[in-house]
Amino acid sequence: MTAVSDTSELPSVKAETVLSARSRKPANLGQILRWLLLFLGGLLMIAPITYMISTSLKWPHEIYNVNLIPEEPTIENYTYVLEDGRFYLWFINSIIIAVITTVSNLFFDSLVGYTLCKFRFPGRYIVFIAILSTLMIPTEMLVIPWYMMSQSFGWLDSYWGIMFPGLMTAFGTFLMKQFFESVPDDFLEAARIDGLNEFQIWWKIAMPLVKPALAALAIFVFLGNWTAFLWPLIVTNSVEMYTVPVGLSGFGDEVDVAWELIMTGAAISTLPTLVVFLIFQRFIIRGVVMAGLKG
Amino acid sequence: MAKLSLKKLTKSYGKVEVLHGIDLDVDDGEFVVFVGPSGCGKSTSLRMIAGLEEITSGEIWIGDRKVNDLEPKDRDIAMVFQNYAIYPHMSVRKNIAFGLWNAPLSKAEKAARIEEVARILDMSELLERKPSQLSGGQRQRVAIGRAMVRNPAVFLFDEPLSNLDAQLRTQMRLEIKKLHQQVGNTIIFVTHDQVEAMTLADRIVIMKDGHIQQVGTPEDVFHAPANTFVAQFIGAPSMNMLKVTGAGDEISLSSGVKMQPGRQTQTGRPLLLGVRPDDLSVDDQNPIVTGKVVVREPLGSETLIYVSGPQGEIVAKVPGKSGVKVGDEVKLGATPEALHFFDTETGDALV
């Protein structure tokens, strides 16, 4: 049987079983409760987004009303935020930081993960455990050493200062190591015989086989850095170096927070995350790895 | 194309030695099959030739080069893996092209080589497909193509047919044999299937527990097995083994039957008498074994009968139309040339 028919059969089989299960049994109480719980969960997820968009369409006097549909909808906030030059700067800062950090993570996390997974060398486990153990240290504990480090290296208030703690992550390394476990050694050995060097084997053979993991990691890292607040707030001083979340928090003045503007900025800043998700989600397809092996 | 020599090759994992000094010379263009039960060291030997396993001691020579310390890519070999290991994210064409990664050829020359290989393997129309769009047999063909395109001194096959279904396996076996006749490269082929070994090999290397048991042509190992292991491993069903006692020009079976094997045996010495199911005939004048047929397995052109008698159960292969039924009393005998004698303790064949 070919793999083509394998993959095409799977979904239809699933769909059938779901259908038959549905038609055979009337919904019982447990099922109703489950649906209800899922529905509430869905509401919970969608509520802040709806509220954000709704608030961004309101005038200042209306923002403390909880009604979803604004009485007098306006796009004034959008015009204001987009015409305010600072928002563009922050947006570009955020894009630069999130993109560079994502690329760096994809490259280095998978390189280290691959090495830890596929090479046998003394001290391999110690290195792996040392990397993993850094996951247990919370960011709040790290910001002071980071700050002191940035200060002594002259990285304060710079892209490098904002980015350096996140250019490689223990989580990403761990994730990639685990995914490389699923890449059979035969592929790598075949490539070794074909004459690729170790770096080429990693780049040309192993990396394309873990695309789903890379896509997932890209989404995680991009979102994490796009929404990062605490560290960028601490390390930046000048308004020009702010990222979107740091900049937005500063909308308003000493006595009043301009929620409608913050929500407008937030609404605009969700767009890149949507784009990233749409680009990468198509790579998150299981079973790519197995196609080159026995049928 | 080149000769291949293994000299006192050993392999240890930690303190455990799994290969105990393998010596073997393979001629230029020879098709040699390593066969043995799992864990016998046949795949390890192959991987050491490929350079995928380190050599603990001993030497490997390909042509006139000692390759112990060469990288796999510099050994002038190509390997086909059991589970194909064709890269799933590349088209067939690209997969085959990877075999030419280091070849000092122009783009056009490479393309021509790929076309040529695809033509030989009859898969020209598959070149643009992805592995997921191929059947098992086609995938294995791509793997062979990737190896062929390198035109290596030595081809290494690591159980390449084990993942195919029975019919396809027979077909691919034939194709590999034809391919060898066509290209003529030296081939080392590892399998646990004795039929594959017999049908493909110029010479068979039978291994067990990290030792070579016998090296010889398929006829050699079948008709003149070096020991009881080889005798029972090669041939299906296995050779029957009967306990006998030598007595000059006679031997006596535990059942009391005496017979003239046509050779001298030491008086009083316990021996093992081996006789292949194919060599036994029913209603023999000088039967070795008499007993009742307990099971009958018709295979079409021939039938296997399991005969139970005072000396235990033995199996015989009789013509499909012989009409022997379960419960029949049969007298099984064989010509003296068909009898094999082995030492009871060492298992070695007595000549």
Image: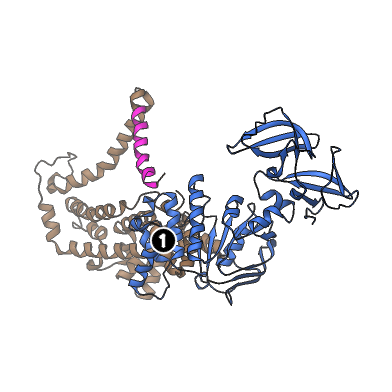
User: Residue A265: horizontal and vertical position, in percent?
Assistant: 19, 55
Image quadrant holding the C terminus of chain B, namely bottom right
Viewer-nearest residue: B153 or A153:
B153
User: Residue B9: horizontal and vertical position, in percent?
Assistant: 66, 67
Viewer-nearest residue: B334 or A88:
B334
Figure label count: 1
Residue type pointed to by label 1: Ile
User: Is A130 above or below relative to B135?
Assistant: below
Quadrant in which residue B295 is drawn: top right
User: Residue A286: horizontal and vertical position, in percent?
Assistant: 39, 49
Rendered brown, the chain in question is: A
Q: Which residue is mark 1?
A: B120
**What residue span does the magenta drawing correspond to?**
A3-21
The reply, left or right, for residue B139 in relation to residue A240 is: right
Viewer-nearest residue: A230 or B161:
B161
Viewer-nearest residue: B339 or B151:
B339
The residue under the point 19% across, 57% down is A251
The reply, left or right, for residue B22 in relation to residue A175 is: right
Q: Is residue B68 magenta?
A: no
Rendered blue, the chain in question is: B
Q: Main secondary structure of the magenta part?
A: helix
The local crowd at label 1, few if under 14, some if 14 to 19, many if 20 or more residues have their Cα within 10 Å, is some
Residue A245 is at least partly visible in this image: yes
The residue under the point 45% across, 55% down is B140
The residue under the point 30% across, 34% down is A39
Quadrant in which residue A226 is drawn: bottom left
* Badge 1: chain ID: B
